Image (cartoon, rainbow, N blue to C red):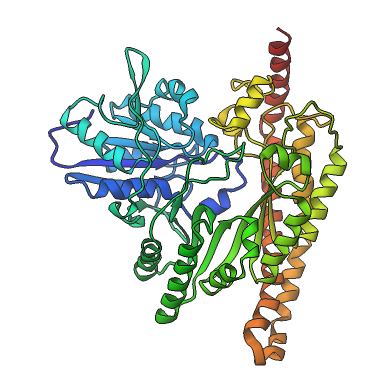
Amino acid sequence: MFDPAKKRHRLRIIVPAYPAFNIYSGVANKTTALGPVCVASAVNEMEGWDVEVIDENNLCRYGPRSQEGGADHEFLQRSRPADIVGLYGGLTSTIPRLYRIARFYKEKGIPVIGGGQHFVDENLDEALHSGIDYIVRGEGEITIKELLQAIREGKSIDLIRGIAYLKDDKVVLTEPREPITDFDALPHPNFSLVRYAKIKLYPVGRIRGCGMDCEFCTVKGKPRCASPERLLEDIRFLLETRDARHFFIVDDLFGQYRDETIEFCRMLECYQRRVDRRLDITVQIRLDKARDPELLTAMRHAGINTVAIGFESPIDEELLAMRKKVRPQDMIDLARAYHRAGFLVHGMFIFGYPLKGSGDFVLSREERIRRFRTFIKKAKIDTVQILLPVPLPGTELRQRLKEQGRIYPKDDIGWEYYDGNFPIFEPDRPLSAKDLQDSICDIMGKFYQFKYMFMVGFHIFSFPALVFFLHNIKSGWRRWYRPWRNALARFGGWIILKGWLSQFERGPFIQKLKQAQRHLREKNNH
């Protein structure tokens, strides 16, 4: 029970564990989510409050683990009681775990606050009846401070903008809060607040929002940016205090505000020279930025080695449905430009995107797979990620498929399957749901193979050949490193894919899918 008389209170922010069968768990135990860290950093400045972040996907050997996966919250409450709990709902697939945690703390009389992309209007009633007392809508750094202060002082929360709660068992929405634009007024992310985690890849960011307006995406709104100096300070502080070397800039589209981006890259290059340290940075970026040689040069000099690009599909009709204004051949040419500039290219794809038309366009499963494989090879993509379309809450894609009566009932296919690895809706003909899932396994199974283990060894033994590049050691290193790194990544991908398939075969999804298809047919027939 919350005790307002205490001199100090503790807020515990929890990032719920992925479902056990999620194939991205390997990356999750090296990093954490930036949003909860930013919110925790804001609360950490408040007088009378202690705050900690528990990322259930990144618990080192000192982290208390429960038998069901994730953290042992019973132990946490005994050893270090939380007065209020915040739950991060940024990934829909973690929502069942989030609700279980919420009910645990709710039963102990502890106020529970939720926030994140999942909590759009259509999900508020479910969330507020699943153990969550208050939901922060939108960005949380300012709202959370006002809400905590009101709870502590026993004041009314009706005038706090940007929250939802229950009143007389009805959902109440307060006035929306304007998006944050003055980022300099916010504290820098403090990763020391993340307990038990061993972070090797640090998420940082400068730009919030995205103006691309893709049908399947939840990130909308005019981009808003912090200064280049602020992002540089984030990286400097992490290097100087935590010896951080690897960074992921989480901006949806690195390179928006071109001139400021180039300025940031040049400042970061100068800083690395001054401290004699070379950083490794990954960014998400648009394909068309490959046409800007000045930007690419600045990025490479700044230590940006990997670009993650949403190619989405090599099929014209699907690109049109997604509202992607680019042709497959143009994408190949631009991807090669990134390759020539020295970047490692991570390609992100969506297989089987549902079209908007009458269904005149028909493409067999085999032909789709062939086009994907051909595109990946021609574009010289270093690593790939093939997902299925996910009708996430709050997206136009979900609304369209819902109106067409194609989304499988949530009682059969729960939120935990909304991670891009499972079919969630009836696909376009002639594909079946099973075709969708088999296809992404076929494409990635061809890309990530056991044979690359031998290639790793071959490249290790070929390392002495760098002696022939003593006149240009940087060029020689790149020639050797890229194929070695890709062989290692493809062998590692084979291990992850094999493990995921093994767990999938033991899991209940096939039975759930058959039941969902039957219920959907019955619903549509009525």
Q: Residue at x 65, y 57 (%)?
A: 287
Work out which residue is located at the far bottom of the displayed protein and give it.
471
Q: How many marks?
A: 0
Work out which residue is located at the far top of the displayed protein and give it.
526
Q: Is residue 257 left or right of residue 356?
A: left
Q: Is residue 448 visible?
A: no
Q: Is residue 175 left or right of residue 155?
A: right
Of residues 10 and 159, which is closer to you in this image? 159
Q: Residue at x 55, y 59 (%)?
A: 283
Q: Quadrant of residue 297?
A: bottom right
Percent position of residue 156, x then y: 21, 25
Give above or below for 427 relative to 45: above
Give above or below for 495 relative to 67: below
Of residues 399 and 224, which is closer to you in this image? 224
Q: Is residue 461 visible?
A: yes
Q: Quadrant of the C terminus?
A: top right
Of residues 245 and 329, which is closer to you in this image? 329
Of residues 396 and 68, which is closer to you in this image? 396
Q: Residue at x 41, y 46 (%)?
A: 35
Percent position of residue 310, x then y: 64, 50
Q: Is residue 100 left or right of residue 108?
A: right
Q: Quadrant of residue 124?
A: top left
Q: Is residue 455 left or right of residue 424?
A: right
Q: Quadrant of the N terminus?
A: top left
Q: Residue at x 67, y 39 (%)?
A: 322
